Image: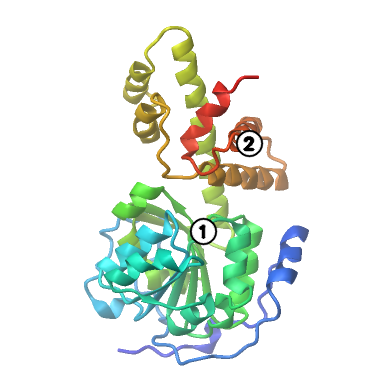
Amino acid sequence: MTLLLKNSFYSHSHSPHFLSSTAMAMCSSFCPQIPYHLKEKPYFSFPSKPLFSPAFKVFSSLASSVSAKDALPARIGFLGLGIMGSPMAQNLVKAGCDVTVWNRTKSKCDPLISLGAQYMPSPEEVAASCDVTFAMLADPESAIDVACGKNGAAYGIGPGKGYVDVSTVDGDTSKMISAHIKDTGALFLEAPVSGSKKPAEDGQLIFLTAGDKSLYDTVVPLLDIMGKSRFYLGDVGKGAAMKLVVNMIMGSMMASFSEGILLSEKVGLDPNVLVEVVSQGAISAPMYSLKGPSMTKSLYPTAFPLKHQQKDLRLALGLAESVSQSTPLAAAANELYKVAKSHGLSDQDFSAVIEALKAKK
């Protein structure tokens, strides 16, 4: 049964009210005035009533069934096929979804195409041909460019469509992208993920969503294909903030863990035994058990690039500064990651931060 779109869902005068001067400058360079038009008739419309119950608490991936095809948007776009985006898009394709992909380096699309995905040469064309478009980009600059730069998604999207940005960006960037998407009459949801390469491959990500609730309700089955749980947090910016706080904690934990491993070695202890002791105590965390054994061998297979961890710490420190919250431990950790980057470790896993502590003064 097709549900008709109500005009009350959309306001064409949305604008970001709390954007920083930096964000506004980026907006002026990347985001010219988006023309209001509908390039093609949407394949589906957003429901006037939620498909699922309100989601202010964590949901299991078992919370909703995706077996009913009419519960899913007909065509799904995916922009950005890096370490995270590629396995996320693959899970959608393997679940039987009609997926259209784009990536700056076209060769990264080939594995998805071989699985049955379609390809479009620009974000604009992906957004124009799909009902819901997901974007997983490396940083705020890339997220803005892909959303509303030249041939960006905002030029192809329109009423009856949705844009879900699962990139990790700051709140100002997310609000900026939201404003330009919503100026076209489309809906916007930010949904950064907690989790790295392996959880992305296994469909075990945690989605931290905020924005248009009706779009959230529509994409719930898709989130449940790619993740194990999801939170709806309210207005745009809340999802971005939650992700930055989580990654700030993670980056600081890894820096402290690295210090502990090296100190244990210096005093004649076996660092592998340290990893076992930590894994059985009150400070146990899956990250320590997963990363520790390879760190003691000076091996850092990339699941979450160090350069992205440092970027997230930098953005978290900016968030803390905006509300005058002191974060001295995160600030110190950020400096350590910067040292690691200076040693050419940007593309190694973020656990390679331990190498910054080994460097000769």
Residue positioned 42% across, 55% down in the render: 84
Where is the C terminus found, in terms of image quarters?
Answer: top right
Front residue of this view, candidates 352 and 45: 352
* Farthest-out residue, left: 67
Given the image, on which type of amino acid does mark 2 rest? Ser
Q: Residues within 10 Å of mark 2 (few under 14, many from 20)?
A: few
Give the percent coordinates (x, y) of residue 166.
48, 61
| 355 sits to left or right of 50 | right
SS of the residue at dot 1?
Answer: loop
SS of the residue at dot 2?
Answer: helix
Q: How is the image coloured?
A: rainbow
Residue positioned 41% across, 47% down in the render: 196
| 261 shown above or below 252 | above
Front residue of this view, candidates 252 and 236: 252
Residue positioned 37% across, 53% down in the render: 205
Q: Are marks 1 and 2 in contact (CB under 8 Å)?
A: no
Given the image, on which type of amino acid does mark 1 rest? Ser
Give the percent coordinates (x, y) of residue 121.
48, 77
Q: Which mark is residue 342?
A: 2
Q: Residues within 10 Å of mark 1 (few under 14, many from 20)?
A: many
| 330 shown above or below 41 | above
Q: CA distance from mark 1 to mark 2?
A: 25 Å
Front residue of this view, candidates 230 and 317: 317
Residue positioned 63% across, 36% down in the render: 342
Q: How many marks?
A: 2
Residue 150 at least partly seen: yes
Front residue of this view, candidates 26 and 253: 26
| 127 shown above or below 256 | below
Residue placed under numbered mark 1 in the picture:
167
Q: Which mark is residue 188?
A: none
Give the percent coordinates (x, y) of residue 50.
39, 74
